[in-house]
Amino acid sequence: MSEVTAASTSELPEVAAFYATCGYGGGISQADTVLVSRICGQLVGVVRLCPQEGVVVLRGMQVHPAFWRQGVGSRLLSACIPFLNAGRTFCLPYTHLVSFYGGAGFSIVEPSELPAFLAARLSSYLARGEQVLAMCRVTPNHTIERDGPQAARPSL
């Protein structure tokens, strides 16, 4: 079974190399919360929670292909939930992953409900032919509004 932890600063070069191996070029910011999944010490999955313009964006969910369908992604997503309980979180998943993210409380939203920066990102993905859509997770006592509070970053 994989173990999920918050990545330390010293692990970020390894995460960047993992992303490159997976063909993901999203980069990592110092403001990101990066969660890593390891099996016997080997990095097998990564996800980032990126605060931006008053919301959090779940980005860069990647699992090494040799570990697909072994629960790595599900454990990573479950580990994200404590970080998502302070407001609004968005993601732009591939359409075939709607039920996966739906299991963590994300719902499909119209592009018009996205913050402007994220609507532009979605538009660029769609223009490239990517099969993605917009999803949002709103915790109780929060509503979808463009200038809501930034989500807190709890520790694991």
Image (cartoon, rainbow, N blue to C red):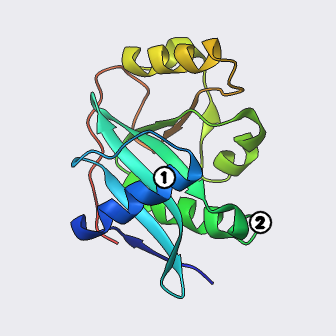
In the rendered view, does 49 fall on the left or right side of 53?
right
The image quadrant where one finds the N terminus is bottom right
Judge by depth and name the residue closer to the eye, 147 or 57. 57
Q: Residue at x 66, y 28 (%)?
A: 132
Instruction: Say whether marks 1 and 2 touch (CB < 8 Å).
Output: no
In the rendered view, does 72 fall on the left or right side of 82?
right
What secondary structure is marked by label 1? helix
**C-alpha separation, residue under disc 1 versus residue under disc 2:** 19 Å
Please name the residue that numbered disc 1 is placed on: 19
Q: Quadrant of residue 149?
A: top left
Q: Is residue 138 above or below residue 113?
A: below
Please name the residue that numbered disc 2 is placed on: 69
Residue 7, how many percent across, how many down?
33, 67
Residue 80, how many percent across, how many down?
46, 59
Q: Is residue 147 above or below residue 66?
A: above
Q: Is residue 81 visible?
A: no
Residue 91, how many percent across, how many down?
53, 36
* Closer mark to the observer between disc 1 and disc 2: 1
Q: Residue at x 48, y 66 (%)?
A: 79
Q: Residue at x 59, y 27 (%)?
A: 134
In the rendered view, does 26 fall on the left or right side of 74?
left
Judge by depth and name the residue closer to the eye, 147 or 117. 117
Amino acid type assigned to the residue bearing label 1 in the image = Tyr
Task: Classify mark 1: residues with Cα within 10 Å, few (<14), some (14-19) or many (20+).
Answer: many
Q: Earlier in the sequence, mark 1 or mark 2?
A: 1
What secondary structure is marked by label 2? loop
